[in-house]
Amino acid sequence: MFKKGQRVQQEFGNQVMEVIGFEPELIENVITQWEDEEGTIVTGKFMESQLSLAE
């Protein structure tokens, strides 16, 4: 289980994201946030099994 503030990334991706929350009714949905190339803040939801801790 991830915690808020941890940095994660998808198994086959290089985008590093920060965990900002969890879907209240479905705990396996991890809400993440990152900044894209243009400086836009992007929010996304992923299944916990799709993510791993970023190094």
Image (tube, rainbow, N blue to C red):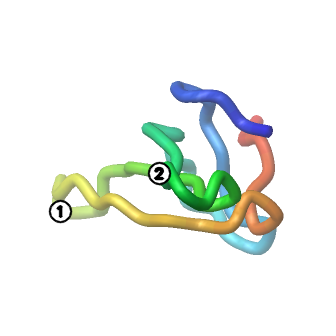
In the picture of the structure, the residue carrying the numbered disc 1 is 38
Locate residue 10, reporting x and y percent: 70, 64
Q: In which quarter of the image is residue 47?
A: bottom right
Q: Which amino acid does label 2 sit on?
A: Thr
Q: Nearer the viewer, residue 27 or 30?
A: 27
Q: Which amino acid does label 1 sit on?
A: Glu
Q: In which quarter of the image is the N terminus?
A: top right
Residue occupying image coordinates x 47% and y 40%: 21
Local secondary structure at mark 2: strand
Label of residue 32 in the image:
2
Label of residue 4 in the image:
none
Residue occupying image coordinates x 77% and y 73%: 12
Q: How many numbered marks are there?
A: 2
Locate residue 44, reporting x and y percent: 42, 65
Q: Quadrant of the C terminus?
A: top right
Residue occupying image coordinates x 76% and y 68%: 50
Q: Comparing marks 2 and 1, which lies closer to the viewer?
A: 2
Crowding near the residue tagged with mark 2, few <14, some 14–19, many ≥20 C-alpha atoms within 10 Å: many
Q: Nearer the viewer, residue 50 or 10?
A: 50
Residue occupying image coordinates x 74% and y 58%: 48
Which residue sits furthest bottom? 12
Locate residue 6, reporting x and y percent: 61, 29
Q: Quadrant of residue 43?
A: bottom left
Report how far apart the C-alphas of labels 2 and 1 lie in the structure.
18 Å
Crowding near the residue tagged with mark 1, few <14, some 14–19, many ≥20 C-alpha atoms within 10 Å: few
Name the side, left or right, on which 11 lies relative to 28.
Answer: right
Local secondary structure at mark 1: loop
Name the side, left or right, on which 47 lies relative to 17.
Answer: right
Q: Earlier in the sequence, mark 2 or mark 1?
A: 2
Locate residue 16, reporting x and y percent: 56, 49
